[in-house]
């Protein structure tokens, strides 16, 4: 199943929140993203159906192996692209916002080229 940009955002958010404190519920994701409960509920349902997320009886969200792989990929892209833009002189808040847009649109080939270039420069 191909996941859309919004789904990637949800997965990345679950990943980031789980790294911060472990237990992640839909309400936490909604607060983190600034989305309404119905929007989060619908998205989580789609992610569950797609095999990206599991929800236990207490409402705790857990990424499946596929969900975790996708979330890490997006998070890594976001982190690297933010760093590149900041190194180029872009203000941090703008770099972070722009990286959030770029992380979903950039091809694997272009991302890997940027990543390899940055690894050589660091």
Image (spheres, grey):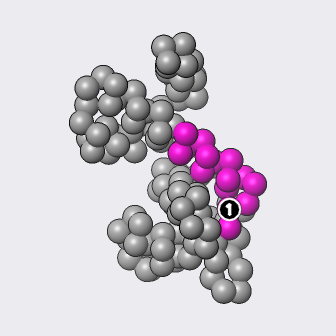
Image position, residue 28 (x, y; %): 48, 74
Disc 1 element:
strand
**Callout 1 crowding tier (Cα within 10 Å): few <14, some 14–19, many ≥20:** many
Q: Nearer the viewer, residue 119 or 56?
A: 119
When the figure is inspected, residue 67 is found, relative to residue 49, above or below; the finding is above
Viewed as shown, does residue 58 lie left or right of 24?
right
Asked if residue 30 is among those painted magenta in the image, a careful observer would answer no
Number of on-image labels: 1
The overriding secondary structure of the stretch rendered in magenta is: helix
Q: Nearer the viewer, residue 8 or 82?
A: 82
Answer whether residue 34 is visible to the viewer in this image.
yes
Classify residue 32 by image quadrant: bottom left
Task: Residue at 58%, 28% (x, y): give it.
Answer: 108
Task: Residue at 58%, 72% (x, y): give it.
Answer: 24
Task: Residue at 54%, 62% (x, y): give it.
Answer: 20
Viewed as shown, does residue 91 lie left or right of 115?
left
Q: Which residue is mark 1?
A: 63
Image position, residue 95 (x, y; %): 31, 37
Image position, residue 38 (x, y; %): 44, 80
Image position, residue 48 (x, y; %): 67, 69
When the figure is inspected, residue 64 is found, relative to residue 112, above or below; the finding is below
Viewed as shown, does residue 43 lie left or right of 35?
right
Q: What span is in magenta?
A: 62-76
Task: Residue at 73%, 60% (x, y): give it.
Answer: 64
């Amino acid at each position: 199943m191909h996941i859309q940009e919004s789904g990637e955002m949800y997965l990345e958010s679950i990943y980031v929140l789980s790294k911060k404190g472990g237990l992640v519920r839909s309400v936490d994701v909604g607060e983190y993203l600034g989305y309404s409960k119905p929007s989060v509920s619908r998205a989580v349902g789609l992610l569950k159906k797609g095999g990206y997320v599991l929800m236990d009886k207490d409402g705790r969200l857990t990424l499946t192996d596929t969900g975790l792989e996708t979330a890490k990929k997006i998070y890594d892209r976001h982190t690297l692209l933010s760093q590149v833009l900041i190194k180029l002189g872009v203000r941090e808040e703008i770099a972070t916002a722009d990286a959030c847009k770029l992380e979903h649109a950039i091809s694997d080939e272009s991302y890997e080229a940027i990543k390899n270039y940055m690894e050589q420069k660091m």
